[in-house]
Amino acid sequence: MVQPYFGHKKTHNLDLNPYCLHNLDFINIIILITKKTKNKMKDLVAKLQADVDAFFKDAEAQIEKGNKAAGTRARKISLDIEKSLKAFRKQSLEASKA
């Protein structure tokens, strides 16, 4: 018996209806990814806040007191801040796509 042709073939088993039972695992995975992304972003913001506070403390010590070691620490922290900002930007873009 020849089956009728409807113009497309189903190439995957994923039904896009979110209420289908076999999609619950897929939906739970998306929720978990979203929660992990939010947690990573919260952690990054907390790290950035701590780094910025430490940077200002060390930068002020260098400017006001001429503390060379504080200047070295401030420069090192500024590089860490840059890396954290890039990581936050990446996480933020991933969260906006989800």
Image (cartoon, rainbow, N blue to C red):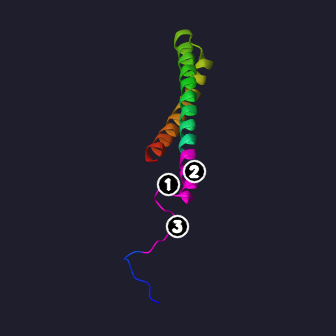
**Alpha carbons under labels 2 and 1: distance apart:** 15 Å
In the image, what residue type sits under mark 1? Tyr
Residue at the image point whose x is 48% and y is 62% from the top: 15
Give whichever of 32, 80 is nearer the camera: 32
- Where are the magenta residues, as a range? 9-33
Above or below residue 21? Residue 43 is above
Say whether residue 21 is magenta.
yes
Q: Which mark is residue 19?
A: 1
Above or below residue 19? Residue 68 is above
Q: Would you name the residue on which mark 2 appears?
A: 29
Counting other residues with Cα less than 10 Å from the Cα at mark 3, is it few (<14), some (14-19), or many (20 or more)? few
In the image, what residue type sits under mark 3? Asn
Which secondary structure lies at badge 3?
Answer: loop
Comparing marks 2 and 1, which lies closer to the viewer?
1
Residue at the image point whose x is 50% and y is 38% from the top: 86
Q: Would you name the residue on which mark 3 appears?
A: 13
Counting other residues with Cα less than 10 Å from the Cα at mark 2, is it few (<14), some (14-19), or many (20 or more)? few
